[in-house]
Image (spheres, rainbow, N blue to C red):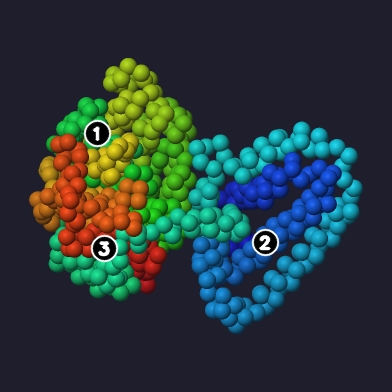
Amino acid sequence: MLVLWQLDRVWETGILPTVFLQGLRVDLILAGMAVAPLLLVLPVLGHRYSWSAWKNLTAFWAVLAITLVVFMELATPTFISQYDVRPNRLFIEYLKFPREVFSMLWTGFKPTVFLSIGFTAGTIALFWRVLRPWLRSPAPSSHKKALLLWPLVVLAVFMCVRSTTGHRPANPAMFALTSDPLVNSLIINSTWSVSFAIYNLKHETENNQSYGSITDEAMLDEVATAPWLAGYQFPSERYPTMHHQTPATQTDTPLNLVIVLEESLGATFVESLGGRPVTPRLEALKSDGWWFENLYATGTRSVRGIEAVISGFLPSASRSVVKLSLSQSHFFTLAGLLERNGYNTGFIYGGEAHFDNMRSFFSGNGFQHIADQGDYANPNFTGSWGVSDEDLFNKANEELEKLHASGQPFFRLVFSSSNHTPFEFPDGRISLYDSEKNTVNNAVKYADHALGEFIETARQQDYWKNTVFLIVADHDARVWGDELVPIKNFHIPGLILGGEIEPKRVSTIASQIDLAPTLLSLMGLETDHPMIGRDITRDPDAPGRAMMQFNDYYAWMGSDYRVTVLRPDRAPLDGLYDPESGKTDYLNTSPSDARFQRALAFAQLPLWLYREQKYDLPQKD
């Protein structure tokens, strides 16, 4: 019924049959979740001595589950009318304001309220009537048959709930198949949507208020007066970090953009950055563009790197916004900005795009096209995490050639995956660094080989001369050790190159959040955006800084390698980082009030922007 109601939008996506097939899959997930609690207690309660209690519990649970599902589906059309999506986190948020909500429903949706209550009550009565004959049935003479079948049923229910043989169980992102959030939400059912949002609330409440207290005004003032933002005006109350950026590069037409995000490629694998010599192809390219010698990741997970590179978003003590519910649409990304400027935008991945909720975040925030493992017709090699990097880059080159031929400017995010445990890659491509094949060093060397081949191929294509390429890691392979914040393992390589890019060594400390503003400037785009990273083209040699989130700790490192570490419910630490040893020497003194307030402001800002939904572009007229 919902599809018929929204048929024009569903039809436009071209996935009408898929909506029903995948919807059935989601319903099986929910059915399995409903059955699971009773199934787990059946061996204890399902025998003849507790038959009466078992029947009453089963009947109560069944009626409760059916009532919940029916109620949520009846509430869905009204919610869609208001928010253009199925009930989600907002549905829970409004439960905090029952007086206002019930007043709104009573005033504006009175017929809907009565119909919903009536249908729900009728469902309860009907289902209870169906169960009554079973409630009068005698106890079974033997419990053995149930116990023998129990493991098989548990396995079947487990398969229903997990719904995939992949690395992660199914989640709503797996069903984000289009760039229309409403159509994606029609596939799932409202009960699962709200349940998943409730599950994620515990992560959204993980905040960094325990670092210290700062007012919103002081926080925003601290950020707006940062040295690298000098000269910018912040006129918007709705989007307080929004400002106008004028590019350093003037071009007849804005350049295309390709970002290659390399999985787990830390500086520990780059010889000139103090690491092992397993990236010779990348090292050979560093004199052809902007080579970052002091670039630092914001976190230790791919989603943290994605939010920094694609959205210019600061790290926080909560989970990455790629996974949080309020940022699945109406959240700033380079794709959303470039889409507004007439670009064709897309994401190319060798694995399953629903992993880490990427598909949902991307499709809801400006990425018009998503290609993942299912879009490779005849890959040369497929491992646990998807097709090889060679297959990935071959597909990327094919897309870029077609996009260039179309004449439309384009943006593509290309995310590699070969450098990921269990480190699978095709034979015969590289001379092994380690004698055992499937090691991290060999996987990095293969990923470097595939990257080098891609850049060599791209140089020979027509799109090379009017395209800016960024090659950057999402994070290091393993970030661990006895350091409170292992800063050494946040050091990553970064390289910007392309037909119009002049070679440059960037030795100042830089953060992943600086890359997006710098790219826009090099592309020749004059834009308004909310990113507060540094446009390095303005003064490449000016002092820099880096922000890093590691577990519950937040570290701010200045250009003098002075480090301020914020800790939950404890005093901040003051330290000095030594790049040579990779160690931080913590001082006996506390950081100055100025350094503490600066670190606190930048640590608190991202979650505030997220919760208040203030990190986006103004809606088009």
Residue in the picture at 12% in, 44% down = 507
Residue 435, picture quadrant: top left
Q: Is residue 496 left or right of residue 429?
A: left
User: Hey, what amino acid is under mark 1?
Assistant: Thr
User: Hey, what amino acid is under mark 2?
Assistant: Leu
Q: Is residue 183 left or right of residue 568?
A: right
Distance CA(mark 1)–CA(mark 3): 31 Å
Residue 95, picture quadrant: bottom right
- Which numbered marker is on residue 601? 3
The tag earlier along the polypeptide, 2 or 3, is 2
- The percent position of residue 375, horizontal first and vertical second, equals 47, 39
Q: Residue furthest front?
A: 588
Residue in the picture at 35% in, 48% down = 551
Residue in the picture at 54% in, 66% down = 91
The residue indicated by pointer 1 is: 268
Q: Residue furthest bottom?
A: 107
Q: Alpha-carbon neighbours of circle 2 within 10 Å: few (<14), some, or many (≥20)?
A: some
The tag earlier along the polypeptide, 1 or 3, is 1
Distance CA(mark 2)–CA(mark 3): 43 Å
Q: Are marks 2 and 3 in contact (CB under 8 Å)?
A: no
Residue in the picture at 41% in, 27% down = 424
User: Hey, what amino acid is under mark 3?
Assistant: Ala
Q: Is residue 254 left or right of residue 439?
A: left
Q: Foreground mark, 2 or 3?
A: 3
Residue 496 position (above or below residue 514):
above
- The percent position of residue 403, horizontal first and vertical second, equals 34, 46
